[in-house]
Amino acid sequence: MNSVQRKQRQMQEFAHATARVLIASYFIAAAGGVIVDPNSMGRFLSLSAVPGYLIWPNAAFQIVAALAILVGFQTRLASALLALYLFWSSFILNYVPGDPLALGAFWRDLAMIGGLLMLFSHGRGCYALDNFLLKQTEKHRLAERAASEIAIQTAAIDLTPPTA
């Protein structure tokens, strides 16, 4: 890989990590808004068929999934679940033909779903917690393999008949 390709790869990885941070911050901010002022979300939900007690599981799910995306832990799973959640919640709450504000929110959510699907298709990227965890697991596996090979060699030495 030449220096131009290396720089291009670095820019792509930086853009990927930045996208993860921006997408995650959107959902963390949305959940934070619910936590700070649950009554406004409750009033919004009361206008739809969604029960108000779903506010807290909704906020918890958004925070957990967003944090997973933010740090790069199970990014594909978190982005897929968040995309499904966002599609259905947006369809239920924001798809109101004839209401330009609601339809604007619906299309904004569809754009965010597009970003989540891009994360799903491209995975965690270079700067991710999963990469660190995989390296630690690989080091542990290599250490175990080396220990078992030493044990096998030691056992083989012990099986040799004594010379007279």
Image (spheres, rainbow, N blue to C red):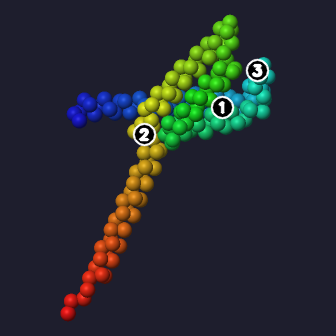
Residue 118 in percent (x, y) is at 46, 27
Does the image show residue 70? no
Identify residue for label 3: 48
User: The N terminus is located in which quarter?
Assistant: top left
Q: Residue furthest top?
A: 98
Q: Residues within 10 Å of mark 2 (few under 14, many from 20)?
A: some
> Which badge, 2 or 1, comes first in the chain's sequence?
1
Identify residue for label 1: 31
Whether residue 163 is situated above or below residue 144 in the rendered picture:
below
Q: Secondary structure at mark 2?
A: loop
Could you tell me which residue is drawn at 64 percent across and 21 percent down?
A: 90
Does the image show residue 99? yes
Label of residue 160 in the image:
none
Whether label 1 touches label 3, CB < 8 Å: no
Q: Is residue 15 left or right of residue 89?
A: left
**Could you say which quadrant of the image residue 44 lies in?**
top right
4, 72: nearer the viewer: 72
Q: Residues within 10 Å of mark 1 (few under 14, many from 20)?
A: many
Q: Secondary structure at mark 3?
A: loop
Q: CA distance from mark 2 to mark 1?
A: 25 Å
User: The C terminus is located in which quarter?
Assistant: bottom left
> Which badge, 1 or 3, comes first in the chain's sequence?
1
Whether residue 76 is situated above or below residue 43 in the rendered picture:
below
Residue type highlighted by circle 1: Ala
Q: Secondary structure at mark 1?
A: helix
Q: CA distance from mark 1 to mark 3?
A: 19 Å
Residue type highlighted by circle 3: Ser
Residue 3 in percent (x, y) is at 23, 33
Identify residue for label 2: 127
Q: Nearer the viewer, mark 3 or mark 2?
A: 3
Q: Is residue 161 left or right of residue 55?
A: left
